[in-house]
Amino acid sequence: MDGKSRSRREVLQTLGASTLLPTAALGRLPAHTNVVQETIPRAPDADSKPKYSIRFAVCGMSHDHIHGMVGAIQRGGGQLVAAFGAEPDKLVAFTKRYPDVKMVKSEDEILNDGSIQLVLSSTIASQRAPLGVRVMAHGKDFLADKPGITTLEQLAAVRKTIAHTKRIYGIMYSERLEVKAAVKAGELIQSGAIGQVIQTINIAPHQVQQRSGDAGGGSGRPEWFWDTDLYGGILCDIGSHQVDQFLYYTGSTEADVVASQIANVAHPDRPRFQDFGDMMLRGNRGMGYVRLDWFTPDGLGTWGDGRLFVLGTQGYIELRKYTNVAVAKSGNNLFIVDQKESRYMDCSNLTLPFGPQFVADVVNRTQVAQDQAQCLLAAELSIKAQRNAKNVTLHPAVSALAASANSGHSAR
């Protein structure tokens, strides 16, 4: 090796060593900082038999979320006795997964079966509320996939039918109800762990075409997924998850949409689709911001890097729901900082309460699993955010670049 090469190597080594020093120094926490890492233990009664049992059916399975919904009710003691679906591919997958369930030929067979107490549905989004009204009119409770309602007219009909029939109209906001870290966050907030909640920030990226799983993209997106009138629009659809969390964690019983906007940045071939949206919310007990998109890159390894930040007067909480990016693939990560210490909680052992609570609500006519008014207020706010959103068009050069980068994903 000549003198020039040796000299260059020595310079690089020197630079490398010097640049590591500040990094190491930054990695050291002050001596007074208390850091605690813990794993939430498995509940002693996690494997106990459900207290109640009900008979339920599925009527519409257009979105794969139906599998998670069925699983929740089964964990609560529900017995799946019948199912109806209109899409042949979904029927094949459903029958394979639940081979012992009776597959009926029509919706009416389920509605007119007096032994069925609860109906679940993930039919096309715009059809869920009208179906729910019919279900309640037949004396049964209803649990819809989100968005459970896509127009204010549907919302009015749902509220009127609830008042008349006294039945339950539930909406499966699974990003709170079926995420263990989100459940734990609720427990901490309600115990006063971070004081009074001031604001929630929800970052909710999604993936148009995921590889597998029950989040809806494993087998390709159906045509209704791309039509605003059918899926409700990005703020009404996936945004309803985030509005539900805003209301729940702030405890707001009244709220308004301060501002909202939507855009189709990278799907010009799907003009009735929106791939970006955000909104600001103001409630009587807190404020909120929500960002939604369909731009999760393949490199993440899961369908979305969902984050929740809850700011309180005495501390804050962050959830990394589905992955701890570039650190670990596992989800259900909760971080909490208060006046005494910083804590990390692995919430993966926590038992999800929604299924048993919802089955108990069906039996006892209670509202423990989901407050009915809050459930419908979340739907109302997401619909209003969508209806009043400013439709933003980015500079053509920006949109063209995004479309080019995204073409490999949306085409699959």
Image: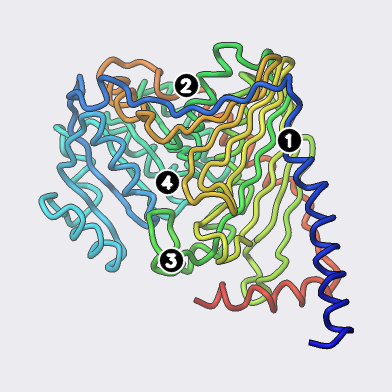
The structure residue drawn at horizontal position 54% and vertical position 64%, both measured from the top left corner, is 208
Name which of mark 3 and mark 4 comes first in the sequence. 4
Label 2, label 4: how many angstroms apart (C-alpha)?
19 Å
Residue mark closest to the camera, 2 vs 4: 2
Q: Pointer 2: residues within 10 angstroms few (<14), some, or many (20+)?
A: some
Circle 4 sits on which residue?
Answer: 128
Q: Nearer the viewer, residue 365 or 6?
A: 6
Dot 4 amino acid type: Arg
Residue mark closest to the camera, 2 vs 1: 1
User: Quarter holding the N terminus?
Assistant: bottom right
Q: Quadrant of residue 247?
A: top right
Q: Pointer 1: residues within 10 angstroms few (<14), some, or many (20+)?
A: few
Label 3, label 4: how many angstroms apart (C-alpha)?
26 Å
In this rendering, position of residue 209 left or right of residue 406 = left
Label 3, label 2: how many angstroms apart (C-alpha)?
34 Å
Q: Position of residue 72 (x, y in %)?
A: 31, 36
Dot 1: element: loop
Q: Position of residue 391 (x, y in %)?
A: 77, 57
Q: Which mark is residue 371?
A: 2
The structure residue drawn at horizontal position 20% and vertical position 21%, both measured from the top left corner, is 52
Dot 3: element: loop
Q: Pointer 3: residues within 10 angstroms few (<14), some, or many (20+)?
A: some
Name which of mark 1 and mark 3 comes first in the sequence. 1
Q: Which mark is residue 28?
A: 1
Q: Nearer the viewer, residue 122 or 309?
A: 309
Dot 2: element: loop
Residue mark closest to the camera, 1 vs 3: 1
Give the number of marks.
4
